[in-house]
Structure formats: structure tokens, C-alpha cells
Image (cartoon, rainbow, N blue to C red):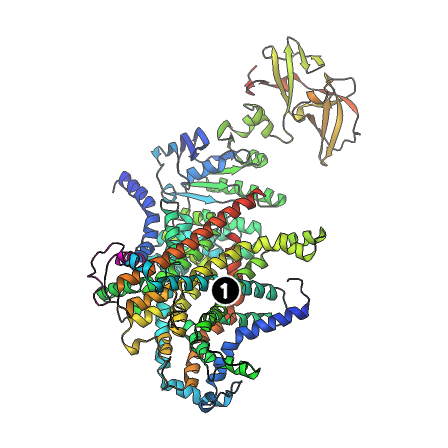
Amino acid sequence: MNHLSKLPRFLLLGILAVLAGLPVYWMATTALSDESQLYMNRQVPWPQIGNLGSLLSAIAAVPAGRWMVNSLIIATGTTVVSLLLGSLAGYALSRFRFQGRGFIGFLLFMTQVVPEALILVPLYAMFITLGLLNDLAGLALANAAFSLPVATFIIKGAVDTIPHEIEESALIDNCPRFGILTMIVLPLIAPSLAAAAVIAFFAGWNEYLFASTFLMDRGLWPASVGLASFIGQYETPLSVVMGTALLFSLPAITFFLIIQRRIVAGLTSGAVKG
Amino acid sequence: MPELILDNLSKSFGDTTVIPSLSATIPDGEFLVLLGPSGCGKSTLLRMIAGLSDISSGELHFDGIRANGWSPKQRGVAFVFQSYALYPHMTVRGNISFPLIMDAFRPWHHLPGVNSFMRRRLMASPAISQRTEAIANQLELGALLERRPAGLSGGQRQRVALARALVRNPSLYLLDEPLSNLDAKLRMQMRAEISSLHHKVGKTFVYVTHDQVEAMTMATRIIILDRGVVQQIGAPDEIYAAPANTFVARFIGSPAMNLIPVTVNEGRLTVPPALTFFYEGPLPAAGPQILGIRPEKLQLLSEGNGPLPAQVAVVESLGAETVIGCRLLSGATEEHLLEHDLIFVRMPGVQRIPIGTRCGLGFAPGDVTWFDAATGQRRAS
Amino acid sequence: MSEQATTGLRRFGARALPHAFILPPIAYLCLFMFWPLARQMWMSLTDAKLATPNEGQFVGLANYARLVETPAFYASLKVTLVYATSAVVLGVTLGVISAFAINRPFRGRAVVRAVLLFGWAVPNVAAALIWLWMFNERSGVLNQILTGVGLSRLRWLTSIDWAMPSILMVTIWQVAPFVMLVVLAALQSVPDEVREAARVDGADPLNVFRAVTWPHILPAVQLAGLLVAVWSIRRFDIIYLLTGGGPLGSTSTLVVRIRQTAFEAHELGMASAYGAVGLVLALLIAAIHQLVDRRRARWMADR
């Protein structure tokens, strides 16, 4: 396939791009349509920018802003916890030789296999006891359990690439291990930290199951739960629903647009190392 | 300022023993060179002295006190790595002042966020910045203080590593092949700088290298190692004049000492299989021995003269001197060739001698060093 | 403190240090993942109900026995396997094709690549919303296209025949970009010299592909396949939001059944049993992958 001449390749790419982009395009189109057109089986197949103003004010009426803020809080919390604990674990797995190293690696892998639905109920029961129910912080803690191992894996891979001598030099210079981690290692693996942060952030941003189960207050709803509440009800106009959905998707889409090159690079270095 | 005592030091990694048992006493102010081929354990030994590697067994004493469990900080050592190990994300100033800053840090200063704030503050403090600049100027790095290591040449990085070592005023300097990443000319220059540094500072330097030229020019004492075992300890002159065994004889000196296996039969020596000549100097016991003679002690004579008939095989003209490699005409066929079968002769100036010329090699008996053929040990005769 | 004591303390500190680093993360994981998991496994051996999660009686393997006799269980097992396998095969194929298609540089490549990533970037809930609208029987764009070319409308999410394929469509839309990224990374690390050497040796493009490129990206493809398989077993949000497990359980994977059994039938013990089966299945797949990986590594070393 590498050696396909240009035309078939571009044709293929065109088809793929249409298939991949259609849903998002349609989201935008639907958001910027007149409500009356949508149900007559004659939806206008392009976004009508003229509707933008009314769309934005309608979104403001729906508590979309509040939802986004909640999503932001949860996502940030997930990221912070994942990075903090992931740095400790990733550094330890890279630099220290201790018993149970392999077992811990297995445990971390296990977390990627467990379905969230499986621990939903016991976590719910536990949160009641700990008083973490109906609490955005509790959600962040629950989410981070799934992103922490990924962060650990990424950070460990990055720390592996730092030459031992730099750390030994710091030891000679009277820097304690923890100081080596914070002052020498972490600054040097900043790109990998960013990658881990992104993964954790979006895991928290997109999360639905725990959020819908653990939060009682409508005021605490993140956007994922808020949007899901639109399903099956007809009060809110579809265009507003789509507009909010698009807003909810926008951070991820723009982010991926900007840094996709780095993702490939980051995955390459990991893949080559194994 | 420690007198270093290494007492039966040994190092094993799992089942592999790298250093079986090593003992030595290093007085204060020495420039000690650990010399040997790759894998001989010299770097391992250095790291044990530094506190970077654990000592498997044996005792290490600093000024009479057992120091096996001491941290590098407690030992007061500075370490210069082969790759310099500069902190890539810090400026030259940051690198040099790092040890001083670490000495001033409290444990809780290491928290993320707090650490960069404290680091910046300490770097700007008068005490630290003055000392940093003083050391930097001493090594001609003053103009480079705000650069990152990536923007420095090899020699400059080398000097930053030295500055970082100097700034802590340690009692012991440990250097692990610091010059091997530099080109030949720079290496010569840095050799002189390191020697003068040692002279100025007056502390003990322990220097690891595989390059015998560095050892010979810089050391006050050399420990030669092969596969973890000490071959000889001594001053450069002693080692050159009286190598303890064939390994040392061939390691020191360039080109290496010529080692000729001979069979001794009273006054007659036979180079197997068929070259026999008379010899008037002191002789070791009868039987197979090894005759050692340095290239500069051999004379190239015209054909028919001298005890050893030979044929020129290689001529290396270095301008100030010429090194000529000859093959002894001992009747040897392919199977009887000597180990490193060429005999090297050093002659001053430019010598135009065609390859294949027959000649004779002469030497004075007083210049000969005898080695036991079985053990390789030098024989006092 | 005496010299001895400080050295002794230091030695202890040095040995304890790795544990100090690794303890907080592991403790955290135990609290928020492994302990709940263990509780859940235990719950599968009780008859706990949703209202009183902590008061179930121990019933041994009774839940599992009931499970084996419930047709719904086999149905959901089959649905899970069909779903996972199809997702892997189709998702990986599409991802690999995309990777190859986008591998050569051209003007605007970054934009096209970004568009191809949309499926992975869009959050589950938003994806559910838009696909629900696109699948809408009366007014959705997919049926508009079908009627436009003269075909009849499909009941995408509401007919037994089309619900699973619809879910698969969405899944593949979400998953193929990830596969593409992973395979692309491997593709771009194929050393050019090896490929060119093969060409110089007279190999035609197909052979170059077979001998050089494919073995090189195979680990990446396998890894991607493994991840897609495991994710498919775990996937809840999108299925639940699109079909709720219907119609008639045709899209009820094991994980969806957990939700239904726990929150609709209020049978926590049974729900946990479902979950246990799902977990075992996922672990099995991971184990198989490990085995295949190790065997391949040995085979490569022997060549």
C-alpha cells in the first residue's frame, strides 16, 4: 500500500476522512440549523452560520457553563492525582530493584483490564462510608485509579532513557533521591509528563459511568452527565443539544489537532523501546 | 584530607566476581592513576571509593576510619564522569552552583514548586554566586555562565564538570576517564590543566584511564589492574624501568616492550627454533625464559652485525622519530611465530629504510629485563 | 546520634526508599480499585441485593450455577464475543489501512490526520448523541442518504438485526484512529535502510512489505488488537447510551448485563457473577496475548 500511486491513495484518504469526519460535521450542521427544519426529514446538510448567535445564547440558558466547569474540576483532579502518584511509581519501577517489582507491574496492567462497571457498586458503598459521594473530588479519585497506571507506564519509559550518571552526579552533589526526582528527572521528562497529563485529563473529562452514579446534585453534574440527560427528552431543542455536545467535544478536538504530531512521536519512542 | 586505605576490597555482581581482593594505601595529596584495559574493574573500584557502588567485602578507610557505609556526601568526594553528566536543563552557573545549593537545602525544599523557587533564590545569593563565579573564572568559563550544556564544546563541558567538582572543595577528587571523549589535541591540553589543578589544589586525585600516556604523564603513583587483580603499584618511572610482569611490560610504553621467548643454555640463548647467539650479561636459570627489551634500547645494525638477524617489515615515520618493526630470522615457519611477532626498534629522526632490508639487532645486556616464561613474572637477576 | 547509629539509619533508609516511593501509589490503588474488586468478587458469592449491599448471605457458587442456567447469560456471552471479535477485526483492519494511507507526506497531511482522529477524540457521550441523531429512523442523515439513493429506511438501533452492526459502526469509528496511531508510529520507525536494501536486492514492493514492513509492525498491530479486545469487553457508556442493551438483549454485553442485573433486577450477587465472567474473559485475552508475544519473540530470536 505504501507504493500505491497518488490517485488511489488520495481517493482512499478522501473516503476515510469523510467517514471519520461526518459525525462531527453533522454535529456542527445540526447545531446550526433551524429547529423547524430538523424533523421534516429535510435537514439542511451544511451549517448555517447565521444561527450561531441564537445558538450561543440558548446554550447559555442550559447550564452548560456550569457543567463544563465541573468537568474541568474533575479532569484536573484526575490529572493531578495521576501525575503525582504516577511519578513516584514510574520512577521507582525504573530506578529501584526491589522484590515484587514484577508483581506490581502485573497489578498495574490488571487495572487496564477491569471494567469500570465491575467496581461500580462496591465503590459506591465505600464512598458512602468515606463521605466521598456527591463530591467532585471523590470522582477524581475514582477516575485516577484507571489513569494512574498509564501515567506510570509512560513515566517509567521516559525515566529509563535518562542516563544513570546524571542522577549519580546529583547523589554526589548531596541531592536526596526525592530531590533528584523533582529537580532533575521530572524537568527532563517534561514531554512524557505532558502526554500522561493529556491522557489523564481526557479520561476524567469524558468519564460518564461513575459521574452519573456518584453525583446526586444536579449542580455538580459534569458535561458528560448533563448531555446524557438530554437523551430521550424533548424539552431542549436538538440544535442546542448538539451545540452543547460540540462544545463538550471541542477541547479534545482542538487539542488533538494541535499536538497530534507529538502523540506519534511519543508513541514511537515508547514503541521502539517496547 | 584522607589517607585512603583499601583493605582486601572485593566486588561481585551476583555470581560474577569483578574484583577478587585488592589492597593499597594511598597517601594524601597523591595523583593516583588506576590503569588497565577495558573491563579490568578500574571504574568499579573508583565507584566503590566514591560510594556509588556497594563494597561486597573488605574495608575502606578514610584517615583510619571505616567508611564502607558512608554516603558520598559523608566521604567528601567529587566525581567527574566520562560523559561529564552535566544537568542538561540547567545553565553552566546552575550546574556549578548545584552542590552549594544542595548543601543549603532543607528536606522540605525539595517539594515541586518550592524547589525551583529556592534554587533561584540561592543561586542569586551573594555567597553562592561569588564562589561560583570565582571557580568559573579560574577555569576560564566566566563568559559561558548563562549557557546551557548543549551550547558548549566538549572541552568546555569538561571544564564545567571540573568546576562543579572544584566548587565543593572536596577532600578527594575522583575522575573516571574524563578525557576519553575529547580529540587528541584537546586531550593533551586538558592533561596539562588537570595536572596543574592537582598541583594547585594539593588534594588526592584518583584518576581512571586505559591510556598509558595519561598515566605516565600525570600520575605520582599508578595501580595497574587486569581483570580485577593488581599487577603492579608504583611510580611511573619504577613501573617503566622495572615492570612486574609481562602484562605490565606490554601495557606501558608505546610501542610496547619487546618480549622474546628464548631457551637459556649457559652462555647461549636460543630463539626457537633455530636462532642461537652468545650472551654475556647476567642470566636467569636454564630453560625457557622471556627476554624483554624496550624499543629504544635496540640498535638497528647492518646485516651480519649484532646477535639477532632480522628483516624489516614495517616502517612508521613520525617525524621526530621512526619506529621500525622487524621480523626475527629465527628459522620460524608460520607455526613458530612469536606472539606479536614483530620486534620494534625506535630510532631518532627520519630513517629511510626499505621494507625487506636484512639487518641485525643489537642491545646491551644491562638493558634487558628477564621474565619467567611460565608465570610471566619478572625475574630479578 | 552516634556515627554507628546514623550509618545504620542511613542503611535502613536506603533499603526502605524504594518502598517509600512505591507505597503511596500502590496503597491508593488498593483502596480505590483492588479492594472494591475483591469485594465485588466476594459479592458474587452472596445473594446481596442493591438496597442492602453489605448484608448478603454467603451462597457459594449458587449465583454461578444460576448463571449457567440462564439463557440470557449465554446470549450476553455470545454478544460480547461477537462484538469484541468484530471490533478487533474491523477496527484493526481499518486502522492499519488508514496508517498506510497516511504514511507518506503530502500537503495538508496534518489536517487529514487530525480529521481521522475525530472518532477517538470525541467523548463517548457526545458521540452517543450525534450517532443517535444520525441513526434516527425518521430524520437521521443515514436514512436520508438511503432513501436518497432509493433504498428503504433502516431501523438502525431498534431492530434486532441492525442494532449490533450500528453499535459496531460507532465503535470502529472510535477505535480505528487509535489503531492508526499505534501502527503509524511503528511504520515510521521501520528503518529506511532495511527497506531500501531489500529493494536493491531486487525484491518487489509486495515482498518488501511481507519481509520487512509487516514483521516490523506486527507487534504494534498485535498490541492494538489486544487493547481493542479488552476495551470492547469493558465498553459500557456507548452501548448503554445508544441502545440500553436492547432491543431484546441483542446488544447486551456482559458489562451491560452487570448494570441491568444490579440496578434493574436489584440482584447484586448475580451482577457480580456476570462481572466476574467478564473479568476472566478479559484476563484470558491478555494471557493469550502474552503467550503469543513470547512465542513470537522466541521465533524471531531463532531466525
Tell me if C63 is positioned left or right of A72 in this view. Answer: left
Left or right, residue A101 beside residue C42: right
B202 relative to C191, above or below: above
The quarter of the picture where the C terminus of chain B appears is top right
Q: Which residue is mark 1?
A: C178
Tag 1 secondary structure: helix
State how many labels appear. 1
Q: Which residues are magenta?
A: C33-62
Question: Residue A224 at what x, y percent from top left?
Answer: 37, 74
Locate residue C67, reporting x and y percent.
31, 60
Identify the residue at the far top of this view.
B266
**Among the 4 quarters of the image, the one containing residue B173:** top left
Viewed as shown, does residue C275 lie left or right of C146? Answer: left
In the rendered image, the vertical position of residue C63 relative to residue B45, given as above or below = below
Point 47% across, 84% down: residue: C139
Q: Of C165 and C229, which appears nearest the observer? A: C165
Quarter containing the N terminus of chain B: top left
Q: B195 or A128: which is nearer to us?
A: A128
Q: Position of residue C281 (x, y in %)?
A: 39, 56
Q: Amino acid at mark 1?
A: Phe
Main SS, magenta residues:
loop
The answer to whether residue C184 is above or below residue B242 is: below
Q: Is residue B147 visible?
A: no
The answer to whether one can see residue C218 in this image is yes
Name above or below for residue C229 compared with residue B157.
Answer: below
Residue beneath the point at 40% across and 65% down? C235
Where residue C248 sits: x, y (%)?
A: 38, 71
- Dot 1 alpha-carbon crowd within 10 angstroms: few under 14, some 14 to 19, many 20 or more: many
Residue at 46% across, 41% down: B174
Q: Nearer the viewer, residue A105 or C49?
A: C49
Q: Chain of mark 1?
A: C
